[in-house]
Amino acid sequence: MSDGKRIARQAPCVVLVLLFLFTSACADADAEPQPPDKTRQDKLMNDPKTAADNTEKKPNRLINETSPYLLQHAYNPVDWYPWGEEAFEKARKENKPIFLSVGYSACHWCHVMEHESFENAAIAAYMNEHFVCVKVDREERPDVDQIYMNSVLAMSGHGGWPMSVFLKPDLKPFFGGTYWPPQPRANMPGFITILRHINDAWENRQDEIERAGNELTRVVRQMSAPESDSDVALDTELLERAMQTLLKSADRRKGGFGNAPKFPHAMDLRLLLRLSRRFKSDEALQVALLTFDKMANGGMYDHLGGGFHRYSVDARWLVPHFEKMLYDNALLGNAYLEAWQLTGNDEYERIVRETLDYVLREMTDPAGGFYSTQDADSEGEEGKFFVWSLAEIKEVLGDEEGTLFAASYDVSSTGNWEGTNILNRPRDWNEVAKEEEIALEELTTRMAAAREKLFDVRKKRIHPGRDEKILASWNGLMIATFAQAGHALDEPKYIDAARKGADFVWTEMRTDEGRLLHSWKEGKARFNGFLDDYANLLDANVEVYHATGDVQYLRRAEELAALMEEHFYDIEVGGFFYTSNDHEKLIARPKESQDNATPSGNAMAVTGLLKLSRLTGNTQQEELAWKTLESLSSQFKQTTMAGGQSLLMLDFQLGPTYELVLVSPNRQETDEALSVLRQRFVPNKVLITHSADDAVPEILKDVMQGKTAAGGEITLYQCDHGSCQRPVSGIEAVKKALEEL
């Protein structure tokens, strides 16, 4: 978001051109609603109770879509169009502005705006008369979302969802914002007020709208193509500055970074784990571990069902935004796995297992892919599914056990949030055990049994809605985490989930020509794949290879890398565009350079390419990755906290990086050696395991040249950038060498 503010300040013309709209709309924010004496339509618009109850429910064009978010709006009285030429042609033919509304199915305020405005019959009638209304699921069309979010950032310096943008028929944006209430409220302009001002400007001030659209489009294109900075050296000093920046922004009491709301920052936490080792910084380690502890003990973690909610609305991790996103659980599962490998803390292992078990139980399609989100709301109330009263808990557990549970999980008769209780662990259980005069082991055992009973009861409640579309990019993140966790924990069910997920995307989400498709639902895959689809799945297939030793996944990774280079790479300056060279023509071709809730596509391209190049010896892939890092360098000067994944891979590339080849005639000895490696925190490694009795696959021939089971014994080859140490043979010697990594 900081880049949006920066570029907005560089483009005062946008602000000046748009001022006629923004100030006139906001001027009415404190005004009383218009008296209901004009027309029936105005009376309806000024009545907050007016909604779809007054309208015969007929489906609009969204009824033919597969997106759950679009289908939620299929019975709005608004004449919604999906993004596409039909809507654009109507706008051109009738010379109407386009109202673009972007959101996603688990978005709480998207639901609020729908109920307040889009289900209001009179507001819908005004929209239908004066605008061509287009609804977009940001998860299906992240390209459209990125471009027009940049326009909102340029106008206001902040963004979010629902995103509301007004476009000319040529798709150039000229005004926008996020959520607006139907009528002026709390210094916010009313949606109907904005609609009227936009319509007046469209009819009477076309020249100003033309200037606004042209200028704003220029700024959006500038934001979509960040410049590299040759003065930024990609070296260990950059990593040390990044560590200091993270430490300065850390909350040393409550964990996390900055103030409320608090987001997980999984990539930054993983970076701190690495840099604590590189620079021997106890401070960096303690900041990371404090955050891991606070998140796991807070209300952002689902203590009954496992998995993490989206973020905490307060500074102490108590009150979550209750939606659950697949990507958060993939990224945090991976982060807690590394924290466990570094510390050996059993609590971190428990969090990993409970999180991945939640995904297997509630977010996995029978065919193998992973669903996108679970809603924050159930029965029309945010968080209702997850919260408890003290009476409910005692009814399930009995008075004695209920009282103990209440002491352990911060439950009271008055509640800790809006009269109800969000389960969390603000006190150390040693303190609780001492207070209750029981042993810690007994408390832990009894609370595990209590959680299971409460979970069984909670299962009978009305569940939050689930968005069952399967996104290639988010599945890539989840597949990689299942593979890494399955390998580290020696857990076959996680490896099996990773394999099935990878196979699902490969068989169900590609064109006949082998190109990726972005989204799948109910047997139908659609939308041209984006950079993060290719990059995340490239990395995922590398990790499935690590976990299984099955070379077909390495071949798939190689194929994805080639397609990514052919269709996305910027030959002139390096780095990858977000959309392919044969994608639908939009007003800008964005180049995603900063991490947001998920790692940027460019950062993940670097991740997959560097790992793959070390496994195959393909130096061209390494060169592409390094040029991409150089193209991202300017962001490291501006903000560290938007480049965590890129910095992880800079750490990888600067080394030491461990290229491990294990050749053995005995599978049992291979497993014995791997058991030493699994639990160790050695993040900057790639691993080839090869049976001495098998032929070397073509894709591994360069790296495997001359590497055999010396003397018929298991042999470890340890290299870095192709420079290898003396091989180590014999199971005990191999185990000792792995322990010393």
Image (cartoon, helix red, strand yellow):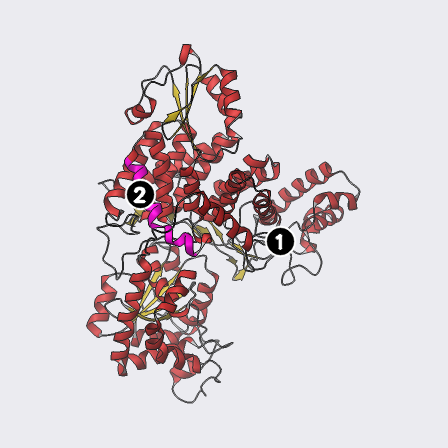
Is residue 388 or residue 57 the one in the foreground? Answer: 388
Q: Amino acid at mark 1?
A: Lys
Can you see residue 651? yes
Residue in the image at 62% along x and 55% along y:
422
Image quadrant in which you'd find residue 626:
top left
Q: Residues within 10 Å of mark 2 (few under 14, many from 20)?
A: many
Q: Position of residue 472 (x, y in %)?
A: 35, 45
First along the sequence among labels 1 and 2:
1
The residue nearer to you, when weighing 626 against 590, is 626
Amino acid beneath label 2: Met
Q: Quadrant of residue 261?
A: bottom right
Give the residues in magenta: 620-638
Which picture quadrant has residue 317?
A: bottom right
Q: Is residue 211 positioned above or below 451 on the image?
A: below
- The residue wearing badge 1 is 254
Q: CA distance from mark 1 to mark 2?
A: 42 Å
In this figure, which residue is indicated by the disc labeled 2?
509
Mark 1 neighbour class, 10 Å CA radius: few under 14, some 14 to 19, many 20 or more: some
Query: Which secondary structure dominates the residues rendered in magenta?
Result: helix
Direction from residue 191 to residue 527 in the image, left or right: left
Q: In the image, what residue occupies the spot 50% across and 40% down? A: 274
Question: In the image, residue 245 lies at what x, y percent?
Answer: 51, 52
Which residue is situated farthest in the top direction here? 711
Q: Is residue 558 left or right of residue 671?
A: left
The outermost residue toward the bottom is: 37
Query: Given this view, does label 1 or label 2 mark the residue nearer the observer?
Result: 1
* Left-right relation of 363 to 146: right
Q: Position of residue 677 (x, y in %)?
A: 50, 27
SS under mark 2:
loop
SS of the residue at dot 1?
loop
Q: Residue 563, how many percent across, how many down?
A: 26, 41
Residue at the limit of the structure toward the right, as seen here: 437
